[in-house]
Image (tube, coloured by chain):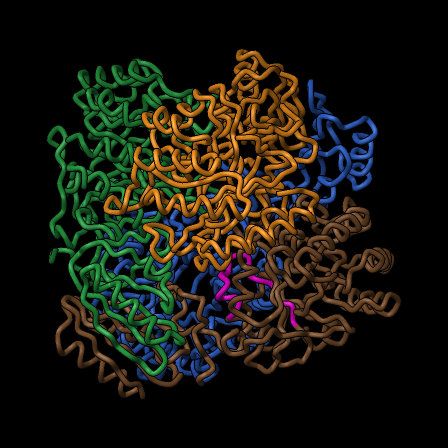
Chain colours: A blue, B brown, C green, D orange
């Protein structure tokens, strides 16, 4: 599979990651023998690697012998090899993801929803309440965000909540409200799906299926949305690396659904002044590593409405293809996330300022 | 619900957590007004809180007014109140979990599996391979760990893997192998369930259902296992707080299944020499906060077999009720996690040394 | 001290922080008694607090009694009070920093260097090599960055290096090279000082004294630079919270030197694709909390030259007052940080693109 | 330098660390060329490496060429090489520390203070107040901890405090109190030194010089204590890796002072229930990597007195050579860290329980 090239400007695949997820698909790797490895140890390594269909290159240094492993992309389990007698460590050369990789597909993926192209020149804005609470609330918000220039409506009907005693969302009734708002305003809808058995139901109503941060590695769910042909907004786990985000995209894509939008929404760090730490670096990193569109959620990434505007401007300046923002007509009355939701007036301000940044990076909104 | 007391020796409920998961169930809270809050702001807060069925206590300081909120445990959404005009912040007094709380149930929960009591004086050891690979591999391991003194057999038939291209487990066939090993050795079985729709199937074969670290906040799955009466081993998310772990236990328990075993398995930090950082503090913290049994997984918490023995001894010294350990007859051939699996000989050594620690803390094994 | 107001839009002082640094200066605090606290416990608390010169407000709830503590800003040690019998926890109301606080001084601090105002409308760019290596290297870089529009020259003569075997900097000779470059180009100089006894020497040559990330809590050094009247560029510790950064600024300011420039340079997280994680949220947070100028170091915050441009644009879009960027005429030959240094050509590109962002936020450069 | 061997059981040197601190001293490394590297690129790399005195081994794979670099331990800057045209990344083979490495010195370092051997079979306990407050307080504590079986007295005369408004320690008067307590009780003294210019003064009074967590990378201070021959207790930075801790030990040792005691004192993570997270894994990791003694500070590693006993037992079970514990006759009156200090009675209990663990690991106390 010659298309799986190492991206020229990327230089590191974390060695330590090997031990976390020793699932690399690439054919090329390097086995570093221990200083005190015997000839028998070396022979055993060569025999095993050869048996699995690879060729080897032996390089004997003054102190250490290195085995280069060359071949096609059959799976070779580094964890097992690194455990062999005389082996010090194993270093892979290729990346663990393929379909999501920009090496595999150099040109940007563009996903069109209702005439709006996600991943193109235009910055796409998705806005709306955290939770669907009532038809009135959704309609009021939808009208406001449409007027301010948003392209899609967001809103949660199924809500993942830390506490079983919190409001869990309106469920199908909430989906119907979102569909009604789409009918009235023409704004297409992005909403979360939380379990494999909900996928069919949510896909009936939603234009984009959102996978939430807590479900980024819920593989049954990733497989289920991968079997639809509905675009998927995949939120980065609050505790997941950029590489793991791409591996989760790979799950969806390997099931046939290549319409994946990646979303940076803040990561968990020691800093607690903000709800999360917006990993702004992730935006240019993802644009290097993958052809998939990248959007940013400044609401969850900050957790405080006073910071949402600055974070949105930073995201667009850094190269994001879109934003997903919480707006509520009356945040103080919101059943969830009122702290980080914008009032309509502030969302208008935000759109005006983000538009200027978009122009400065030669994009429209 | 008067039983929901604040545990006397626990002094902090994270203020910042409020904004992350403003789902506190307790009735008592404190509202701190801003310095420039007007009388109207204060009246609006009092009116709202009163309307929701709470009583208030007003305390006017030289610079700041504080509203104490007193009442029963009806839900009051702090996020919304903290967003009201003139409110600086809201501080809760009670904890967000109830059924899992030691305040609610002071005596330890004891869960009996095949005559072995988890949560009692005896240290319970669960051991076996990361993945079920074949009947021979499982039988060989089961015999070894039984002989060494383990009480239960662990092994994965459904495997959550970062890469879609990695071995995903043997599925039902793996469950049948585990059942066969139980029949032959008498060791009962703990194995992972990854999706709500698998729960019925896995529960047919398993004696303990394991929820993996990536699924700790997969609420559909928590609800599903909560509806069985099979004991659940709930692994802490690799980047979840202790409080979130208890909230996830609360999900299972609020569905009726109170047989929950908590498992500390290492958290993700900046230190990358080890696969994870074993949060040994979590053991005594959990023993303070909850009545549920606490076990430790030293294999994932270190990621390196050379460290597993020391981590196991530390866990028992710190008060853990059990251990869950990866053992493989031939780690270099393991399809997953070979790096952290113990050879049989080393597992015997570990059991001997852990036994001495158990005696030192006046427990048996 | 009535000027120490709580900033209206800031709602949290981390409760857990109390136990980390129980050094709050504010007078107002709340003591929450345990549910089982006796009248004697309460009396002891009131007696102690009163003895230290505070007034109290008692609020008895159904389950919990709360003591409001009111008074001037004399120090009251929460750690000690939280340890008293019957006390559940202590919550402070005011912030731990004062001179650095925007409450204390609402208008922005402006620091003028060589006619360039840091903290005003103009975005100030400091650029140059990581390490001073030779007169030729510094002169070549200085001429380049000046031509591209930078306002100050950066370069390290004393270098903090993880390894004692690495190049430790040219020392005073390096300072002389920087002074020579200033003479030739007119660019004033920012350079690091690493020890209290070096302060006098470095201050002879430098226009801004840089405190590096590893020294953010080197209090002897903070006190020493606080006793000069040279502006200080204070880098955030890679492991320090925003609040700790402000406390370190407070150290410098409390010694009399109010010319402090804060620098966000990336924090350490679990994400290892980048050298650090740029905490872009810190920019608007600091602009809320403090009147001091805020600059961003996109070179260390990313660790990879391919990401520096995007990070710089994000920083300015988020509200930063300046940038400090590593530029090297030949990064592949740099003795340190070659990986993240920009070539001259790329620095020109960066300046052009950042200029457009500056205009979009109505600032110049 | 043939003694600098790779330790047989250690398999990873973080690739990403290279870019953080590209200061590796080892001679052997591997340069991985990009897929699209030209022959000219390869030649340039070979020429440069050869010019710096190394030999090369070229291994051409189907897609990637690898350059093995072989030679003696002259410094080769990977940062610079990794930036060369056509180079994908550089992987080192040897470790960055030498004098501290167990490869360099396989046998344990033993440091004798007043007849007590640190690093031998006996668990050494250092105990006393966080801050020296008065002669009475220190004498009372010293008598208590001596009676309970502690071997050394700890206490801070110079205190690093987050706030400039907090108690900064009694300074030299505090040192005199400690010396007086030593005279009376025979307990030798460990106390912190915060600045290079204090080293002479503190060394006059102290038997062990403590470097605090905030100063672990204060290189001027490390150099200064390295020039004495007084044993140094080096605390791990609260957000420093194990490797960085060893590099800081290397600084001290490279100045001639090989009497370094390493101290794990908890690291900063997202978990905020405890003040820090005790990295218990670090104990066996350090025992593998270095010959230096390793002690644990359970007081700072937990931040709560209720957890100190469990953490102490875990530390000894994991292989620590000693403990350093905060004890205060009246924690509620302590001027600092009262929250985590043990009362005398609880310290007696702790010593009794830790003694049993010590026996279980065949050590005395």
Q: Residue at x 40, y 50 (%)?
A: A279
- Taking depth in this image into account, of A318 and B170 the one nearest to the observer is B170
Residue drawn at (82%, 39%), measured in percent from left and top?
A51
**Camera-nearest residue between C125 and B35:** B35
Query: Whole-percent x and y of residue A115?
Result: 39, 65
Instruction: Name the quarter where the C terminus of chain C is drawn.
Output: top left
Left of A32 or right of it: where is C19? left
What residue sits 76% from the left and 56% below the top? B129
Q: Is residue D74 visible?
A: yes
Q: Which residues are magenta?
A: B232-246
Horizontal side of residue B358 vs C188, given as left or right: right
Q: Position of residue D24 (x, y in %)?
A: 53, 25
Of residue A24 and residue C215, the one placed in the foreground of this image is C215
Location of residue A186 (image quadrant) = bottom left
The image shows residue B211, relative to residue C215, as above or below, that is below
Q: Is residue B271 magenta?
A: no
Is C262 drawn above or below residue A310 in the view shown?
A: above
Residue C279: x and y in percent read 35, 48
């Amino acid at each position: 599979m010659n298309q799986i090239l190492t991206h020229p400007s990327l230089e590191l695949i974390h060695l330590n990651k090997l031990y976390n997820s020793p699932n690399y698909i690439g054919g090329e790797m390097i086995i570093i023998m221990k200083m005190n490895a015997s000839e028998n140890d070396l022979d055993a390594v060569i025999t095993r690697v050869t048996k699995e269909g690879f060729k080897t290159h032996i390089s004997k240094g003054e102190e250490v012998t290195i085995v280069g492993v060359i071949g096609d992309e059959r799976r070779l389990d580094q964890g097992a090899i690194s455990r062999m007698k005389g082996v010090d460590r194993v270093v892979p050369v290729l990346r663990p993801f393929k379909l999501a990789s920009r090496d595999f597909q150099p040109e940007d993926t563009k996903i069109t929803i209702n005439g709006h192209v996600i991943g193109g020149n235009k910055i796409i804005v998705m806005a709306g309440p955290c939770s669907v609470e009532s038809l009135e609330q959704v309609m009021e918000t939808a009208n406001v965000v449409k007027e301010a220039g948003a392209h899609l409506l967001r809103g949660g009907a199924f809500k993942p909540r830390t506490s079983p005693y919190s409001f869990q969302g309106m469920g199908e009734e909430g989906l119907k409200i979102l569909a009604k708002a789409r009918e009235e305003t023409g704004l297409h809808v992005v909403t979360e799906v939380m379990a494999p058995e909900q996928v069919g139901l949510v896909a009936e109503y939603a234009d984009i299926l959102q996978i939430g941060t807590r479900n980024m590695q819920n593989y049954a769910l990733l497989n289920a949305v991968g079997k639809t042909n509905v675009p998927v907004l995949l939120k980065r786990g609050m505790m997941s690396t950029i590489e793991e985000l791409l591996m989760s995209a790979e799950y969806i894509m390997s099931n046939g659904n290549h319409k994946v939008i990646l979303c940076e929404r803040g990561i968990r760090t020691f800093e607690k002044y903000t709800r999360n730490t917006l990993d702004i670096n992730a935006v240019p990193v993802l644009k290097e590593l993958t052809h998939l569109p990248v959007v940013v959620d400044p609401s969850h990434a900050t957790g405080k409405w006073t910071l949402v505007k600055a974070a949105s401007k930073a995201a667009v300046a850094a190269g994001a293809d879109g934003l997903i923002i919480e707006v509520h007509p009356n945040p103080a009355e919101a059943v969830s996330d009122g702290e980080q939701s914008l009032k309509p007036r502030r969302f208008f301000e935000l759109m005006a300022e983000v538009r200027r940044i978009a122009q400065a990076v030669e994009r429209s909104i």
